[in-house]
Amino acid sequence: MAKVLMTGNAAIGEAAIRAGCQCYFGYPITPQNELTEYMATHLSRRKGCSFIQAESEIAAINMVYGASLSGARTMTSSSSPGISLKQEGISYLAACELPAVIVNMSRGGPGLGSISAAQSDYFQATRGGGHGDYRTIVLAPSSVQELADFTHHAFELADKYLIPVIILGDGMLGQMMEPVEFKYEAPEELPIRSRALRGAKGRPSRIIKTFTSKPAELEEINWSLFRRYQQIKKQETTCDAFMTEDARLIVVAFGIAARIAKGAIKTARANGLKVGMLRPVTLWPFPSEKVQELAKSVKQYLVFEMNMGQMVEDVQLALGGNGEVSFYGRPGGVIPTPSEVYKVISRLYYQKGLK
Amino acid sequence: MEKIYTRPKSLKKAVFHYCPGCGHSIVHRLICEVIDEMNLQERVIGIPPPGCSVFAYHYFDVDMAESAHGRGAAVATGIKRAYPEAIVFTYQGDGDLAAIGTAETIHAANRGERITAIFINNAVYGMTGGQMAPTTLLEQKTTTTPYGRDIKLEGYPIKISEMLALTKGAVYIERTAANSPANIRKTKKAIRKAFQTQIDDLGFSLVEILSPCPTNWRMTPIEAWQWIEKVMTKEYPLGVIKDTTGKQDAD
């Protein structure tokens, strides 16, 4: 189909509907309201579909849990403070191996923070976020087109691995308009998941739970989850490398920050500086192997994030001392410009004697 | 010889873990009897809460899933919206439904969600060891009101069923008790009506059951039955609180 001009938030909604999302549960919070509104307009009256503006983010994520129990493709969306409230439900989804898509169009924090774009929920998203040992797949788009593509991909991953998938965007991606093409269309009828609760008809009754009075049983559940996480690490880790072949300095950035960094790198290249970029597309699993591969030839890294330094820890872990890491961050919802980032890059480039 | 009393088909052959004199096992059985009589075993999905009845899924032979504390009404909403053919019930205690889950309960009722809540009111948090519940009576001693519930400090016993009755989406609410053969029969009738309300697609239904907890009340089972009659029903009068199921304009 032809490209259409849409906000990032609306593009997620359209992509979700085309991916076969049947149930959406949300709660108003800026800067993601256009998504909830899109679902109210386009999903709520569709046959076999349901939309609820819930009484809270906690209720919304638990409705997602219920819909997923019954086998529906389901999603919720929010922004940072609301995502904190959803952590309880995300832990239950992960524990009970239930697929769901959770969109975080993140904003400045901590606390009520600001409504401007930020990336300060990286830790929360990539470390599980709620109680207990678990992970969620975290996708970090950096354009409206990727918001649409990754939404479809998120539903597929969630169903494939029976896991909640987080799309970690930000207020800027959600609000900005770009041309977008919707490349996917789910089949009319999606297969019913094998563990779905739909009444014990023609089969024994089924229990979905983790609670047990036997710790060894729960230990085995944890092992089984982590075996699956190992599989996800092997099969689903993705990243995007830009001009890294001859690079002497590599900028590591994700999401909208990678978009800003790209502009800075183009200026650097125009000025003869050999700078490239590594953009993790999956934040969990983190592309550690790619970092290690790059470390064989590149020793200088600049991690650029719109926070006080969160992903930088994963870069350091991946390098394991085989490279030098610098960090530049702007927290609180401040949007840095490409020329600002270029100044940081060129200063570092000369300081480290790369020219 | 005619068999007049038997294990309901939808009640698993498992030994209840509940304390002697506890009301849960009685109510579990009643729900199973109703499920059998209404031929709903293949359609029911139950949501038990964290608490003493967290293991309810070991007794009900129907599809069940655990819920986070207090979120039963939201989870049930999600199930029912995703799969409207299901008959969905939550099984919740007073702390679950009337404290931590108040918001989820009120809004599910107000939206008229086609779900049924079985609400066990025993005036304490049972599983955690007998702390004050929102429904704990004035002057009642619990582990967190060791001097008795004081209205100046802890406020009043909450009448959540009466509050829910104010929402238009709730169409059937009745309070019963599991403390005598007559009241147990009335409880079963109320559960049946609550399920029928859902089947008829009329709105939200709830049965509040005053239920004995001899262990945490520090009473014998017989004293607990008597305490419900003499003390609890004065604060929480039995009977139909709301029934608009017969009305054409029922929401």
Image (cartoon, rainbow, N blue to C red):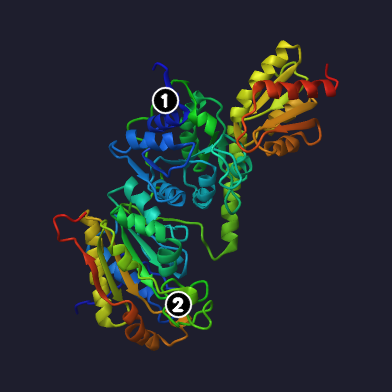
Q: How many marks?
A: 2
Can residue B132 be seen in the rendering of this structure?
Answer: no
> Could you say which disc has been placed on residue B223 in the image?
none
Residue drawn at x 29%, y 77% as measured from the top left: B237
Occupied quadrant, residue A288: top right
Residue drawn at x 61%, y 51% as measured from the top left: A133
Which image quarter holds the N terminus of chain A?
top left
Could you tell me the amino acid type at mark 1?
Tyr
Q: Are marks 2 and 1 on the same chain?
A: no
Q: Chain of mark 1?
A: A
Q: Which residue is mark 1?
A: A184
Give the vertical position of B161 relative to B220 (above or below): above
Give the vertical position of A103 relative to A275 (above or below): below
The x and y percentages for residue A165 are 52, 39
Give the vertical position of A205 relative to B182 (above or below): above
Q: Which residue is mark 2?
A: B151
Occupied quadrant, residue B73: bottom left
Residue drawn at x 39%, y 79% as measured from the top left: B212
Query: How many C-alpha atoms fall within 10 Å of the one at disc 1: few (<14), some, or many (≥20)?
Result: some
Q: Secondary structure at mark 1?
A: loop
